[in-house]
Amino acid sequence: MSKFPRAVYFSGHSHLNLNDPRAIHQKNFTAVNDSSSSYIEFDHGYQMLDAEGKLASRFETPTAQGLAVEIYPGRTVINRINLNADLHDIYTGGKWSANWKPPFQSDGTLAGRPWEIKTAGSDARVVRNFTYTDANRNRKAPRWTSSHPLSAQTGKDGQLALRIEQAEDDELVYHYNVRVTRADNGGEVLSAKVANRFDVVPAADSMDIPVPVKRDGVKYRAEVIAVDAQGNRSRVAVKVLK
């Protein structure tokens, strides 16, 4: 494939989401993830808020995605499309429900900025013009836009909930590292990597993370770090909850 730098390899049946900037890679040619028109996946190892607002071990969501490819003299443009981007859970009543039935609330949106591949000139020039390379990976960390991004809420059954006001990133906030401990003795009550539902349009302004303790006046220390898809980390946001 190194002899054909204008070639674009499409992944086929991956299900991995198209929002992720790592879904395209260039070295000697271009490799592109093309997701799935039934449901998409995040990396494994995360927890996600389900339709009831509970933390669940999930890596799939019912969002459907696809690519629209435009070929012009000297350039190829690949558009990332959310065929629907509604907030649903992959399980309904404990049963698998990936094939969500229309009508959808969303008429389709973009899953990110289009990717553009420059193909004019010699093979060497094409390679020099590659944009989506390891060397060009984003190194800018997410940032908190609120001076107080964390707060305590009362969840269902009187349990404590940690509200996180969404951080911002020039690409996307992929997940939040969340740790909650007792303020008096440091005992850990929650430690989770919570996937951010960036596939949903419009995206939520905040997330309420359930903490498995009653909100009864006991003080807890919450520490949250926003992490983007490249692993860049925000400063630690800290809040004493009670």
Image (cartoon, helix red, strand yellow):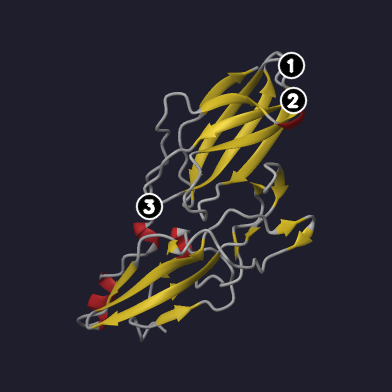
Under tag 2, what secondary structure?
helix
Q: Quadrant of residue 193?
A: top right
Q: Is residue 167 visible?
A: yes
Tell which tag, 2 or 1, sits nearer the viewer. Answer: 2
On screen, 95 above or below 204? below
Instruction: Tell me which label, 2 or 3, sits earlier in the chain.
Output: 3
Asked if residue 23 lies left or right of residue 163, the reply is left
Circles 1 and 3 in contact, beta carbons < 8 Å:
no
- Amino acid, disc 3: Asn
Residue position for label 2: 158
Residue 103: x %, y % from top left: 57, 65
Asked if residue 24 lies left or right of residue 160, the reply is left
Residue 150: x %, y % from top left: 53, 27
Q: Is residue 29 visible?
A: no
Under tag 3, what secondary structure?
loop
Q: Nearer the viewer, residue 216 or 141?
A: 216
Residue position for label 3: 138
Instruction: Tell me which label, 2 or 1, sits earlier in the chain.
Output: 2
Residue drawn at x 61%, y 66% is 39
Residue position for label 1: 216
Q: Nearer the viewer, residue 61 or 18?
A: 61
- Amino acid, disc 2: Gly
Q: Which mark is residue 204?
A: none
